[in-house]
Image (spheres, helix red, strand yellow):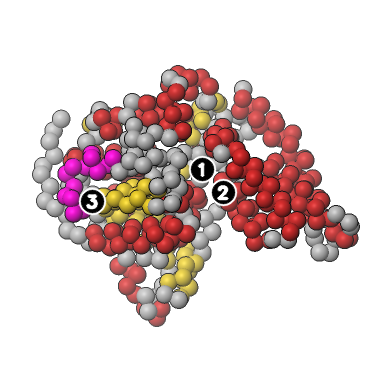
């Protein structure tokens, strides 16, 4: 019922947001007589603030059409490499020729970026992907909003997420593949590669895990505490709702994106309130650059998706409440997840000093589990002064984190696989 009420509220609010959008344009357009009225700039700013507070935020585009490499502009085309009901595997294809002087790019390492399925769209990693493209061939998981998946397709569990990651790895091929997982997917990615190792399958050359909840018993944050404060049945009864009839996924049980967004804002309400006030003030001052930065950030931040209920509840139980991965008690489709079986896949973990979502030590815990990886093939990086988003987006990502990620991948690119022992039967 809550989801239906939310949709009714949004529908009722829509005429006012359209009106506010029109008002902002009428009082700011250069060719409008209203723009010359006393107080027009203040009125336009108020209208735009009202519009942005009330509007619906659709899924953004990656919008990566070209990159600059060694002073040259290289065209980039986004392609769908593989499509599944709950996810599209995207390939960002770079187009260059020997005349560019960049023939070496054809031998660049391949990177699979596994984006989070935790409320925001994969486009949150736009800066991550754009930066990686300068030195790598890049694929990214583009998770589908669950409300857009017909209920007849069936449920989607955490086990299915792991199976998707394995299928994507096999589809791309492991010859020179490196997997980068950001936040939530560090857990299923580690599980996927562990299971592949136990079966004796070829593995990626390296895995980079950034700001993820490998072991949430380490430095628990407010996010971790929220997940453990209530029993699992509380989440199922209070935050799981059916998709309304006006979406393709009508009747599907989901954790709605609008509830997740409310949780995001509730973590720092003062900061978000001040940000909107600053936006209003920037419009009054004519600081269009700062105003545009605000628009870009919230166009991404406010665009959220619904998560399948089964997957969400599995994650709460497995990762945050029972800690099955670090305790060595996690079974996926009847197979035990054992990271110590990984031998020839290097490991880099990255944490932010000020991360308030995945506390220090949670990602680094992967090293305690991956005991089969030689010490020289494991590395950890703590980024001083960086919060959660700063380790994969923005200035710190580009100047401090990426150079080390690039060097780590390059050091293990094309490295011959170690001889694997025959997998044990269970």
| Tags 1 and 3 touching, CB below 8 Å | no
Q: Is residue 20 visible?
A: yes
**For residue 247, above or below residue 399:** above
Q: Which residues are magenta?
A: 365-377
Dots 2, 3 in contact, CB < 8 A: no
Mark 1 or mark 3: name the one nearer the start of the chain: 1
Spatial CA distance of label 1 from label 2 is 8 Å
| Side of 10 relative to 240 (left or right) | right
Viewport quadrant of the C terminus: top left
Q: Position of residue 83 (x, y in %)?
A: 43, 47
Identify the element where label 3 is drawn.
strand
Q: Residue at x 43, y 35 (%)?
A: 221
Q: Which residue is mark 2?
A: 300
Tell me if residue 236 is in the magenta stretch. Answer: no
Judged left or right of residue 266, residue 127 is: left
Tally the marks.
3
Label 2: how many Cα within 10 Å (few below 14, some 14–19, many 20+) = many
Q: Earlier in the sequence, mark 1 or mark 2?
A: 1
Looking at this view, is 399 or 243 the one in front? 399
**Could you tell me if the residues under marks 1 and 2 are in contact, i.e. CB atoms within 8 Å?**
yes
Instruction: Kindly indicate the quadrant of the structure image that contains residue 415.
Output: bottom left
- Displayed quadrant of residue 245: top right
Instruction: Tell me the distance, in whole angstroms, between the alpha carbons under discs 2 and 3.
Output: 33 Å
At 16% across and 50% down in the image, what residue appears?
A: 374
Q: Disc number at residue 378?
A: 3
Residue that label 1 marks: 120
């Amino acid at each position: 019922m809550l989801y239906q009420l939310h949709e009714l509220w949004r529908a009722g609010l829509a005429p006012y947001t359209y009106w506010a959008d029109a008002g902002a344009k009428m009082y700011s357009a250069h060719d409008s007589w209203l723009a010359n009225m006393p107080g027009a700039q203040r009125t336009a700013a108020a209208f735009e603030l009202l519009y942005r507070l009330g509007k619906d935020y659709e899924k953004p585009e990656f919008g990566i059409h070209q990159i600059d490499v060694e002073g040259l502009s290289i065209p980039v085309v986004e392609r769908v490499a593989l499509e599944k009901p709950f996810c599209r595997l995207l390939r960002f294809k770079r187009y260059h020729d020997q005349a560019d002087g960049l023939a070496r790019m054809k031998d660049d390492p391949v990177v699979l970026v596994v984006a989070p399925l935790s409320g925001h769209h994969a486009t949150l990693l736009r800066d991550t992907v754009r930066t990686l493209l300068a030195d790598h061939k890049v694929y990214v998981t583009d998770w589908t909003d669950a409300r857009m998946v017909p209920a007849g397709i069936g449920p989607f569990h955490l086990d299915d997420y792991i199976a998707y990651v394995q299928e994507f790895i096999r589809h791309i091929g492991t010859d020179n593949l490196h997997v980068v997982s950001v936040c939530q997917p560090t857990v299923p990615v580690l599980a996927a590669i562990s299971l592949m190792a136990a079966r004796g399958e070829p593995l990626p050359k390296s895995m980079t895990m950034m700001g993820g909840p490998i072991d949430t018993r380490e430095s628990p944050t407010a996010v971790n505490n929220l997940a453990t404060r209530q029993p699992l049945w509380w989440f199922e009864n209070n935050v799981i709702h059916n998709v309304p009839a006006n979406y393709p996924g009508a009747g599907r049980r989901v954790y709605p994106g609008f509830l997740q967004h409310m949780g995001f804002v509730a973590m720092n309400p003062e900061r978000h309130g001040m940000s909107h006030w600053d936006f209003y003030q920037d419009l009054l001052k004519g600081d269009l650059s700062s105003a545009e930065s605000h628009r870009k950030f919230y166009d991404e931040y406010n665009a959220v998706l619904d998560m399948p209920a089964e997957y969400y509840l599995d994650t709460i139980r497995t990762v945050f409440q029972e800690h099955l991965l670090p305790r060595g008690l996690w079974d996926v489709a009847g197979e035990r997840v054992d990271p110590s079986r990984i031998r020839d896949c290097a490991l880099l973990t990255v944490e932010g000093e000020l991360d308030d979502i995945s506390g220090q030590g949670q990602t680094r815990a992967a090293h305690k589990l991956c005991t089969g990886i030689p010490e020289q093939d494991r590395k950890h990086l703590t980024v001083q002064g960086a919060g959660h988003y700063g380790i994969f987006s923005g200035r710190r990502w580009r100047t401090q984190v990426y150079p080390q990620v690039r060097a780590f991948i390059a050091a293990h690119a094309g490295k011959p696989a170690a001889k694997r022992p025959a997998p044990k039967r269970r």
